[in-house]
Image: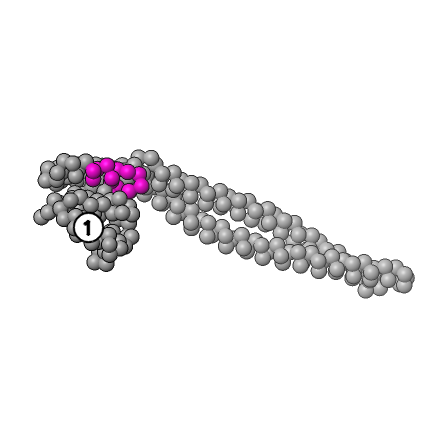
């Protein structure tokens, strides 16, 4: 196996170490737990708002139903007066008839408003059911994360110990100057932990996926065993 190929094997190990450390940093920072708490809190707040509005709508609906019932009783009483035979004065009968019409108009408007209110209450009940189900899931996710975080960090530390031990033999087989360049490149913020990359069959760098020109590929072949770097991402190229 050539030195450059060994560099790629080292790169594989380093990428796994990078991934494990990044994952541990996320767990230790509590970002996932914080996001889970925020999600649970947001859903809980939404549920509270929906329940509060539903209670207000229910209270208003009850008042309107009471008013509707009272108007209905008043209409019935006025109709009994009108047709009871005790009132014979035409003007008074006309006044009662007018009052009944007004009462019926009020009932009609009230029942229209009541229908809108009932539809809104139905929407709120549906929203509450959905929010309650979402809150159950959010709380379960939060509890699972809280329980698993410590365990996962312990597992990551074990894996890191194994990977760091596996790194040693590869490091020993690589030229010190090449290793120094590799570490310099891979630790650069823009390289995301990748210091060396191969070429695909089409002549594209597997690090940045930029395709090299025929001239650049020819120059790489002429370089032989010399260390070459991608002209685009500056990673070490392994031919």
Q: Is residue 203 above or below residue 226?
A: below
**Residue 18 located left or right of residue 135:** left
From the viewer's perspective, is 47 left or right of 163? right
Residue 4, given in percent of the width and then of the height, sits at 14, 46
Q: Position of residue 28 (x, y in %)?
A: 30, 35
Q: Nearer the viewer, residue 67 or 152?
A: 152
Stretch in magenta: 181-194
Which is nearer the eye, 109 or 97?
109
* Pointer 1 residue: 220
Name which quarter of the figure residue 109 lies in. bottom right
Can residue 216 be seen?
yes
Q: Pick the residue in front: 109 or 137.
A: 137
From the viewer's perspective, is 82 left or right of 4? right
Q: Is residue 191 magenta?
A: yes
Q: Residue visible at 27% across and 47% down? A: 231
Residue located at (49% from left, 50% from top): 128
Q: Position of residue 118 (x, y in %)?
A: 59, 56
Q: Residues within 10 Å of mark 1 (few under 14, many from 20)?
A: many
Q: Secondary structure at mark 1?
A: helix
**Residue depicted at x 63% and y 58%:** 115
* Viewer can see residue 155: no
Q: Is residue 161 above or below residue 89?
A: above
* Res. 173 image quadrant: top left
Magenta span contains residue 141: no
């Amino acid at each position: 196996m050539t030195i450059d190929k060994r560099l790629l094997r080292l790169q594989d190990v380093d990428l796994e170490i990078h991934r494990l450390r990044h994952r541990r940093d996320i767990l230790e920072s509590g970002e996932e737990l914080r996001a889970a708490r925020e999600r649970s809190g947001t859903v809980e707040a939404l549920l509270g708002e929906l329940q509060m509005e539903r209670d207000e709508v229910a209270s208003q609906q009850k008042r309107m139903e009471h008013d509707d019932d009272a108007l209905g009783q008043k209409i019935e009483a006025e109709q009994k007066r009108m047709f009871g035979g005790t009132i014979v004065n035409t003007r008074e009968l006309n006044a009662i008839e007018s009052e009944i019409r007004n009462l019926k108009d009020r009932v009609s408007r009230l029942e229209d408003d009541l229908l809108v209110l009932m539809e809104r209450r139905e929407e709120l009940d549906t929203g509450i059911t959905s929010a309650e189900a979402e809150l159950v899931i959010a709380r379960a996710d939060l509890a699972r994360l809280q329980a698993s975080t410590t365990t996962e960090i312990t597992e990551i530390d074990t894996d890191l110990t194994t990977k760091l031990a596996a790194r040693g033999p590869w490091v020993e087989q690589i030229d010190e100057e090449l290793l120094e360049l590799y570490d310099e490149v891979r630790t650069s913020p823009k390289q995301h932990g990748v210091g060396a990359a191969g070429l695909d069959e089409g002549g594209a760098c597997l690090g940045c996926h930029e395709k090299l020109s025929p001239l650049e590929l020819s120059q790489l072949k002429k370089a032989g065993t010399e260390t070459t770097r991608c002209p685009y991402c500056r990673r070490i190229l392994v031919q």
